[in-house]
Amino acid sequence: MGATTLALNTAIEVASHHAGEVLLLDIDLQFGVIPDYLNITPTYSISDAINSSNDLDEISLGSLVNKHESGLHVLSFKHENNVDDYEQAQKIGRLLPILRRFYPYVIIDLSRGLDHVFASAISPATKVLLVSQQSLVSVKNTSRLIKSLKFEYGLQSDVIEVILNRYEKRHSIKLKDIEQAVGDHDIHLIPNDFKVTLESTNLGQPFVQSRKKSSITRSIIDLSHVLSPLEHEEKGWLKKLFS
């Protein structure tokens, strides 16, 4: 289970309480698979939304997004022309302010690592979640990403949080070691539940829907609270980036 699975299930959990108010953007230029996970075939793409950005209103945007039964709305690239997708990705900053007018929650699934083509999506984020694992290489890379987000993208420390994926308490690399490595950033633990995630992927049904009582679903529910604050708090427009 990777960042995309986490982003998808978290978005669906938030959408279960805010139907029609959550938009999940899959902007992975190489391996965007969220439509496949949801068994949907997009008619339109992020490129169509960007090309129509000057004329987008609630009705026209609603015709472009894919609407999942959970109440989640999805937009992705079609991956028919990588060169065209890359050129369009550089214009994503033009689209985001429009999306924020219609969606209180915009969740973005990025590709692995950081690509400056998405600077216009990263810099204004109200929360960035970095997905890491209990390995020296992964933790080291996460520390590097945190530094890049601060010094290259200008993010404040409290915006950046870490997801420790496939967490095992008995692992030789302990939570305290990771806390020391990443510094003063909140860490969210996602338990290692290979069976549930594999079943979810094969069935094309998010585990927050199919396995509601599993430990991994409970951890996603906790994670969703980071994205969905108390009702009296002001809602930021760009709620999450997964990388």
Image: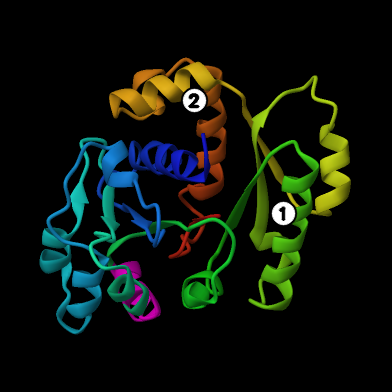
Looking at the picture, which amino acid does disc 1 mark? Thr
* Label 2 sits on residue: 217
- Residue at the location (26% across, 68% down)? 81
Looking at the picture, which amino acid does disc 2 mark? Thr
Q: Nearer the viewer, residue 241 or 22?
A: 241
* Label 1 sits on residue: 142
Q: Provide the residue span drawn in magenta.
A: 88-101
Q: How many tags in the picture?
A: 2
Residue 196 visible in this rendered orientation of the protein: yes
Report if residue 199 lies within the magenta region: no
**Is disc 2 surrounded by few (<14), some (14 to 19) or many (20+) residues within 10 Å?**
many
**Residue 209: % across, % down:** 34, 25
User: Relative to 238, is 176 above or below?
Assistant: above
- Residue at the location (46% across, 25% down)? 197
Q: Quadrant of the C terminus?
A: bottom right
Report if residue 90 lies within the magenta region: yes
- Residue at the location (49% across, 53% down)? 232
Q: Looking at the rendering, which quadrant does residue 141 occupy?
A: bottom right
Upstream in the sequence, badge 2 or badge 1? 1
Q: CA distance from mark 2 to mark 1?
A: 24 Å
- Residue at the location (80% across, 19% down)? 170
**Residue 123: % across, % down:** 56, 74
Q: Comparing marks 2 and 1, which lies closer to the viewer? A: 1
Q: Secondary structure at mark 1?
A: helix
**Residue 229: % across, % down:** 52, 49
**Is disc 1 surrounded by few (<14), some (14 to 19) or many (20+) residues within 10 Å?**
many
**Residue 171: % across, % down:** 80, 24
